[in-house]
Amino acid sequence: MTDKISARIRVLVIDDHPVVRDGLSALLGTEPDLEVCGEAEDVAGALAQLKSARPDVAIVDVTLKNGNGIDLVKRIRAHNPTVRVLVWSMYPEELYAERALRAGAQGYVHKGRSTQEILVALRVVLAGKVYLSGDQADRLLRRLVGGSTGSERVPVECLSDRELEAFELMGQGRTTEQIAEAMHISPKTVETYRARIKEKLDLDNITELIQHATRWVLESR
């Protein structure tokens, strides 16, 4: 019995919602070859769990308490390169899947998909392969071979990871000071991001930017 338990794959669940963490942990607990070795709601907690729990794989949400999942993926790849990473989020695959892979994740699953799909994705990632949904894999391949058109691209795709993080926080109604604190940057840098985003999205003023960001956050949830 001890040998069987020690052979289980150790999974770290990182999500800012307790109910989601509980539900995912319960699902994983039904699988005889998997065990949840830890949970975290923010970057600091995740980094501590990576040290103490020694997971084989981490399931990471894009939005974390006081942090960003894409940035966390980069840190995991830099400091825990043997840990496999699967990003599981409510945000659109066409916007975040490629960003997650570029950051170092081995897969991306949208939370709107079936619970069984995350088990499939997890095992694909654990096998050393990359997991994307069929639609997203096809979209990415078309882009790589130069077959995607401008109409297929989401407007905010032109934003960098950090600009997109700031854009999301703007859409949540955060003030400049709150965004600076959440992103660990200065208020001046937040203003720089605002100016860049406004220019990239061809918006005339800050009011339009905030309206655009708020609408995007609402439509993404």
Image (tube, grey):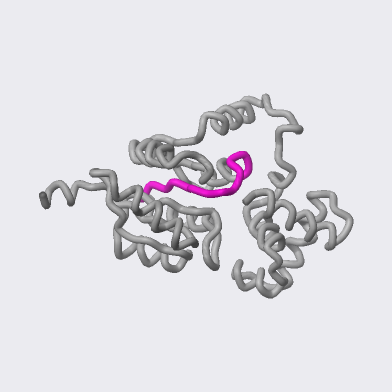
Q: Is residue 80 left or right of residue 148?
A: left
Given the current orientation, which residue lies at the most extreme bottom position? 177
Residue 118 is situated, as x and y percent measured from the top left of the image, at 42, 41
- Residue that appears at 71% across and 71% down: 175
- Residue that appears at 48% across and 48% down: 87
Numbered marks: total: 0
User: Looking at the rendering, which quadrant does residue 46 occupy?
Assistant: bottom left
Q: Can residue 82 be seen in this view?
A: no
- Residue that appears at 34% across and 52% down: 26
| Above or below for 139 versus 77 | above
Residue 106 is situated, as x and y percent measured from the top left of the image, at 44, 42
83 and 86: which is toward the camera: 86
Q: Is residue 55 visible?
A: yes
Residue 195 is situated, as x and y percent measured from the top left of the image, at 80, 60
43 and 16: which is toward the camera: 16
User: Looking at the rendering, which quadrant does residue 49 occupy?
Assistant: bottom left
Span colored in magenta: 82-95
Residue 53 is situated, as x and y percent measured from the top left of the image, at 30, 61
16 and 209: which is toward the camera: 16
Magenta highlight on residue 87 = yes
Magenta highlight on residue 88 = yes
Q: Is residue 205 left or right of residue 147?
A: right
| Above or below for 127 versus 197 | above
| Above or below for 150 versus 172 | above
- Residue that appears at 46% across and 64% down: 41
User: Looking at the rendering, which quadrant does residue 117 occupy?
Assistant: top left
